[in-house]
């Protein structure tokens, strides 16, 4: 009935059953008559000598399809590129060591030999799947992430064992009770708890200034990587289009200033920022082989994957130098890229600047170096274009430390935001200006974990209360002095006073006591809401000490000669990166009594009366988690003995209401 949809068909005219039947039965006769009439009208026959695929329109469509395929292949990774890891050339995802699909043939042959050798007994035995693909590995990771340990439940159960097995809270809290310190690490991803409220520190301290009041600056220092996030990113264009936009944006600053410095981040192997960059990358891992004529990848792919960003920065730096040289302007333009020695362009000449040589990796550290240099040249007004809170803290520190007198303004990369007068900020917060740097590092930055519930506003209040960090960031200070000073500061952030002999584990117990029953009589504080143990705090403090040492050496040519492996990081040779150490390997995560908790399943008329009971056989009292519940019906002698010792008279109970309240909280939380 497909002819019914044609020009002479019935579809759309009528759906009457008789009419459709008559039309269908006469269709072949009508078609024959139409063919005869057509032959009588024009007897000349048309000979078809070409296929429809050879038509000009089809050729044009095929050419467009081929161009689309070329563009797609250019965004993919070269399949002939020998890499250390197996990689998906389309998505760019790097495989883990568990993926072995590239060895599928060899695995199949060896498995076939094993199968034949098992005959006849193993003829009907199922075969194990030994080939692992990226899809299966991703599914495995998702399953593992969903089956993480419930640290809150472990915490509650450990506390509930206090009464039945004579375990003290202080002893329990001396262990982390979780695979990672939950106050500083994400329990699921195991990554550092990066401070998300860093901007609050800037908002709390900044003294705003109108852009009109600043006027034309004598010098401008720009954060190049921050510019890449705000410049126009063509949705359909080439890398050349983006480079052109960046060059126009940066060279426009030359019109209003005699000196312009632009600084880009450097990306070194085994960097202490490896963990932060990996967390920013998330699921985006596509690596491109970029050139100026390559199609421009999406912004998140280009700027969150390290290899892509390095290629973009190199091309932008080269184009900047050549473009500014062609302008032949008398202004001084200095570009700091991957080379430790910056390049200056002035009056069309390219000049190497060994006096500005620096081996520091981060642009955040290089920016204050060049700001101090420009101030020494006599620049009265200096503008820094950046949004980073770390840059703000560094500028405040060095403005106060070097007692600069120039007008230093920090301007955001996007319009509509207010500028910050660094000099006025230092004058307003003169008492804490030199303490912001170590305090910011200790309480959370890109390389140091933050503490759950401790924001930057709390840090400022702690500094204003008179707490100081004089040893943190001093390479000559002993680690004991750094730890003691840092523990006292973090304890103050938790509203606790740290005595000279107390450790962070002691502060952990004091915070737990202060938080217990604050909101409800039946709730205990979450494990991540209390400070870490002394062992994990020591590793995080070492990382903060290392980072502060680098920041305080920003004006030096080279960073301090310190080994990051001795300051809370471990090397990962497969990815050539550094990962933060949550806890030393020899430190247990929970008390042996909790790790070896025995739960009996006795259900007889006289439960736990014989050595068949798992608890009684090792002389352990039964607990709440045993089937007998550790109640009066339990015949375990250890349980009876424990209950007799824990019997309290009514008068004693009324005199110690706090003990009863804590016990009720623990038992209710554990049963929930």
Image (spheres, rainbow, N blue to C red):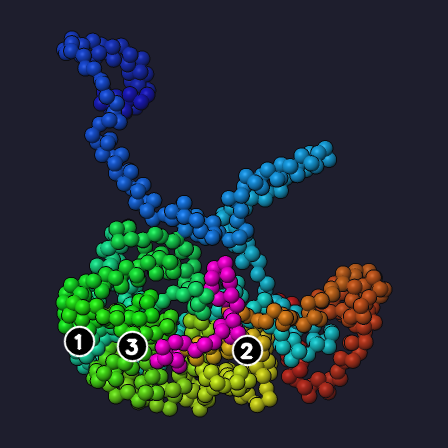
- Return the residue at label 3: 355
Residue 295 visible within the image: yes
Residue 209 visible within the image: no
Magenta stretch: give its range. 551-579
Residue found at x 77% / y 71%: 621
- The answer to the question of whether label 2 and label 3 lie on touching residues, with beta carbons closer than 8 A, is no
Residue 567 on the magenta segment: yes
Question: Badge 1: how crowded within 10 Å, few (<14), some, or many (20+)?
Answer: some
Please indicate whether residue 383 sits to the left or right of residue 117 in the image: left
Task: Judge depth for marks 1 and 2 and give the one in front.
Answer: 1
Which quadrant: the N terminus?
A: top left
Mark 3 element type: helix
Query: Does residue 628 lie above or below 510 as drawn?
Result: above
The label number, if any, that marks residue 258 in the structure image: 1
Residue found at x 19% / y 78%: 217
Mark 2 element type: helix
- Return the residue at label 2: 538
Which is more N-terminal, label 1 or label 3? Answer: 1
The tally of labels here is: 3
Q: Give coordinates of residue 592: x percent, y percent.
A: 70, 70
């Amino acid at each position: 009935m497909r002819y019914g949809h044609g020009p002479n068909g019935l579809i759309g005219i009528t759906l009457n059953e008789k009419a459709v039947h008559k039309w269908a039965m006469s269709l072949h006769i009508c078609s024959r008559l139409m063919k005869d009439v057509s032959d009588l009208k024009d007897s000349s026959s048309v000979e078809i000598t070409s296929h429809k695929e050879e038509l000009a329109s089809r050729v044009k469509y095929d050419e467009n399809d081929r161009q689309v395929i070329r563009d797609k292949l250019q965004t993919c990774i070269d399949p002939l590129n020998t890499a250390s890891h197996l990689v998906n050339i389309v998505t760019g995802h790097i495989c883990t060591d568990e993926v072995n699909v590239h060895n599928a043939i060899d695995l199949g042959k060896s498995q076939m030999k094993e199968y034949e050798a098992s005959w006849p007994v193993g003829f009907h035995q199922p075969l194990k799947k030994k080939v692992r693909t990226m899809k299966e590995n991703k599914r495995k990771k998702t399953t593992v992430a969903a089956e993480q340990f419930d640290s809150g439940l472990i915490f509650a159960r450990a506390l509930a064992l206090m009464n039945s097995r004579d375990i003290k809270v202080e002893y329990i809290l001396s262990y982390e009770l979780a695979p990672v310190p939950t106050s500083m690490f994400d329990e699921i991803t195991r990554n550092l708890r990066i401070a998300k409220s860093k901007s609050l520190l800037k908002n709390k301290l900044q003294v705003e200034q109108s852009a009109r009041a600043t006027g034309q600056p004598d010098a401008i220092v720009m954060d190049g990587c921050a510019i890449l996030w705000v410049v126009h990113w063509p949705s359909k264009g080439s890398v050349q289009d983006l480079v052109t936009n960046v060059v126009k944006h940066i060279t426009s600053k030359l019109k209003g200033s005699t000196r312009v410095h632009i600084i880009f981040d450097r990306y070194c192997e085994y960097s202490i920022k490896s963990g932060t960059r990996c967390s920013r990358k998330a699921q985006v891992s596509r690596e491109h082989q970029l050139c100026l004529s390559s199609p421009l990848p999406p912004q998140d792919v280009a700027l969150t994957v390290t290899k892509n960003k390095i290629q973009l920065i190199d091309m932008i730096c080269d184009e900047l130098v050549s473009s500014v040289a062609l302008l032949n302007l008398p202004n001084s333009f200095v570009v700091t890229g991957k080379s430790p020695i910056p390049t200056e362009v002035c009056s069309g000449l390219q000049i190497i600047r060994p006096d500005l040589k620096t081996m520091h990796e981060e642009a955040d550290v290089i920016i204050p170096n060049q700001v101090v240099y420009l101030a020494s040249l006599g620049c009265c007004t200096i503008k820094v274009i950046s949004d980073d809170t770390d840059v703000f803290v560094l500028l405040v520190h060095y403005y106060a430390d070097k007692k600069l007198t120039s007008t230093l303004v920090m301007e955001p990369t996007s319009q509509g935001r207010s500028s910050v007068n660094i000099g006025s900020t230092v004058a307003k917060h003169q008492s804490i200006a030199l303490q912001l740097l170590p305090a910011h590092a200790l309480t959370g930055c890109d390389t140091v974990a933050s503490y759950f519930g401790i924001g930057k506003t709390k840090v400022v209040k702690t500094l204003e209360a008179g707490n100081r960090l004089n040893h943190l960031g001093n390479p000559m200070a002993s680690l004991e002095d750094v730890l003691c000073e840092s523990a006292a500061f973090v304890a103050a952030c938790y509203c606790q006073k740290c005595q000279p002999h107390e450790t962070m584990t002691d502060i952990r117990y004091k915070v737990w006591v202060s938080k217990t029953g604050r909101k409800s009589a039946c709730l205990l504080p979450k494990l991540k809401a209390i400070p870490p143990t002394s062992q994990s705090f020591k590793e995080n403090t070492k990382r903060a000490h290392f980072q502060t040492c680098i920041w305080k050496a920003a004006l030096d040519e080279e960073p301090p000669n310190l080994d990051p492996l001795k300051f809370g990081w471990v090397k990962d040779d497969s990815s050539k990166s550094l990962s933060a150490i949550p806890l030393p390997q020899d430190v247990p995560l929970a008390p042996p009594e909790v790790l070896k908790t025995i739960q009996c399943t006795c259900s007889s008329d006289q439960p736990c009366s014989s050595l068949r009971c798992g608890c009684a056989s090792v002389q352990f009292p039964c607990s709440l988690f045993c089937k007998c519940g550790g109640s009066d019906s339990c015949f375990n002698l250890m349980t009876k003995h424990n209950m007799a010792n824990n019997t309290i008279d009514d008068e004693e109970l009324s005199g110690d209401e706090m003990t009863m309240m804590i016990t009720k909280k623990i038992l209710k939380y554990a049963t929930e």
